[in-house]
Amino acid sequence: MKKLVILFVILAFLAGISCSREKAFSKIDLSGSWKFRTGDNLAWSKPDYSDSSWKEIKPGTIWEYQGYKKYDGFAWYRIRVNIPSAIQKNSAEKDSIQFLLGKIDDCDQVFLNGEMIGENGKTMYDNVPVTDEFTKVPDKWNVSRRYVLPVNDPRIKWNGENVIAVRVFDQAGAGGMFAKPFEISMVGLKDHVLFDFTSFAFKYLDDNHLQKDFTIINKSGKGDYNGNLSFTVFSYLNGNKLFEKEFPVTLKNGNKSTFSFSFKIDPQTQAYALVAFKENKSGQSVTEKLEVPYILTPKVSLEPRINSARIFGVRPWSPFQFKVAATGQAPLTYMADNLPDGLKIDGTNGIITGVLKQKGDYEVILKVRNSLGMATQNFKIKVGSTISLTPPMGWNSWNCWGLSVSDAKVRSSADYMKSSGLIDHGWTYINIDDGWEYQHDQDGNILTNSKFPDMKALCDYIHSIGLKIGIYSSPGTKTCGGYEGSYTFEDKDAAAYARWGIDYLKYDWCSYGSIAPNPNTEQMKHPYLVMEKALRAVNRDIHYSLCQYGMGDVWTWGASVDGNSWRTTGDIEDTWESMSTIGFSQGKCSPYSTPGRWNDPDMLVVGWVGWGPSLHNTGLTPNEQYTHITLWSLLSAPLLIGCDLSQLDPFTLNLLTNDEVNAIDQDPLGRQAKQSIANAEYQIWIKDLEDGSKAIGLFNLTENPLNIPVDLKPLNLPGRYSMRDLWRQKNLGQAETHFEMNVMPHGTVLLKLQKIK
Ligand code: GAL
């Protein structure tokens, strides 16, 4: 028996060695330190150039996070690496080798032993001088870098030292190598067989069944693949196998095949599936991880509950509209005590309208009643010069419809905002982004294009539902989508917006760059002041949303042009890299967030998105989506849903209708969370709330579940606290000094801590 055990141990040891050896030689890891320096010199591509005085840098994170804050322009990365022929020997396919270099912001040229093996580039914006031809090629910052060479390419030194040098040009904002993977590997099955999980969302079937459809493409060009497809679901909590199915498949050469699996699972279970294709002939397999959505938000109670913001700002004489958002079994009756003269509430739908002429604060009590009881909530109306006293919540057409937006799509979005119940949780704005404009007529009036036959009628329709409507323009002659901008027509445009009944203007820098190339701060402010003056001249409260991607640290001066919100970054995309890079870099803007002045890290990328006529389900995992909503709420960010509202599935709807989470975003104090702890594995953000409690977001940056330790004293939280899990809406007991929370991969836990006296 003892001998058997020893034999077993030896075998296991050898198996371990051979596995790890195969692993070690099947690819070469490039995710360790590289050498780095800013500047530009083509001699730095040469293998014999000495980079010993260069700084070390990690390739997976932009250089701004590694000591090169605000650096834009040229920089070089170099690494020395041995390429053993064993990786070719160990590979089922032996023809080609690939250099995978994550993503590069913005453009790059890659040299192997002094010779260029590939490049990807980016169009320069108008306001940045073109340095050389290299910077002129199309926009590629968010594209995975994959450079493939035949194994007999003379530039490769097999079994010898190779120098990879990457010349990077960063146009603005984030810069350098980021994302992953960084490796050299042989091209194989994983590069020919591509899984697409985003053409279909998980479907919720009856009886706690989830269905997942997805496609696999065989783009090998090498014939059909025969093999087995397996779908195995594991619990994150204990690793238990919850479901397993496997069957033989043929992946036809050049074809896309669709597969479907359905399995029973409790909707709250945190789980993931491993989806694997194993090819018969070569024995190679490709495995992808797919997270299973889980719902944390409890079901809405039948008893009445008021979910709208607790404070509202309006200017004297401006038309007043505010809808009380409330849930509960229908019919609901809406009332308001102490409503100031000039306002009235419609008892059937909770829409308050009228005009207030005097500056001042009014304390109103909202009441909503149904057959099961009555809910009350204090509501402060502040008549003064500042509006948007809580961040706007709504929908914007850009992240789904792009330039294909139309009157019909906007109307139907408003209808879905109502029928989905989002309106009852405080979602208010329906914002038309770029793509509605035609041209200015002889009298300077802006005309809509044929997709928007009657803007006034559209506005009236949106208002009749109790929603508000937004529009988009640029201070330049053209918008980013090439439509007519407002340049020199600002007064006329603002007057048109007021005439139609517009409530929100997103004003996007775009082609203004050619009017003010290389602007200083005053020049950046100028066009926004011009429109501000025009907006103040009309008798309507129009939320003023600046969009110039954070140029000139707009958060430090956005309030001085009377902006109500300002984009702090470039455009968001539905990837972890994009969402997390934007979200976790907002700490710098925290001090500037205050009621009526919001930092805007761009719109939400949950649900069906796509920037044009064809849409896909978000590329964010369910956990990443929880992180997205949690982080944006902690940041007091405008919450603008960017998806097709006609395709809201139960997961997305639950994500957007958790009233305790939304209340963190809408907290009347208007403070933005501070980044209290940030390390490679996790972050902790803390937001002060009006009632003296704290909202605390724990974020797991790793790809595995992680216990995040929370030490209260260093976080400046001495004493004892009651603790509530806001996503689950559950009390967790008390905390003092220290606690730990298990947080899902790329996921979050959002807590509210109230001090116990
Ligand atoms: C971009 C802006 C996007 C969208 C687009 C319209 O500059 O950041 O959010 O508005 O223009 O063309």
Image (tube, rainbow, N blue to C red):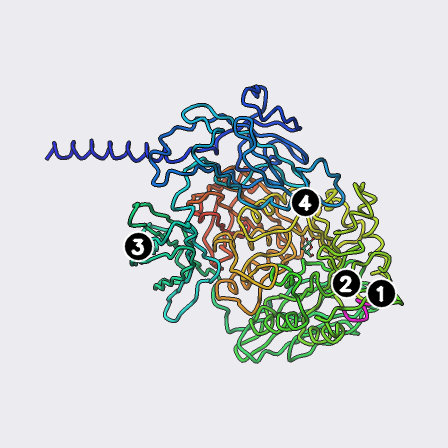
| Mark earlier in primary sequence (4, 1) | 4
Identify residue for label 2: 542
Identify residue for label 3: 228
Name the amino acid type tagged 3.
Asn
Dot 3 and dot 2 residues touching (CB under 8 Å): no
- Give the magenta part as a residue range: 493-501
Q: CA distance from mark 4 to mark 1?
A: 38 Å
Name the amino acid type tagged 1.
Val
**Does the magenta run of residues contain 494?**
yes
Q: CA distance from mark 4 to mark 3?
A: 44 Å
Q: CA distance from mark 1 to mark 2?
A: 9 Å
Prevalent SS, magenta region: helix
Identify residue for label 4: 123
Q: Nearer the viewer, mark 4 or mark 1?
A: 4
Where residue 692 appears, as percent x and y from the top left, is 61, 51
Q: Nearer the viewer, mark 2 or mark 4?
A: 4
Q: Nearer the viewer, mark 3 or mark 2?
A: 3
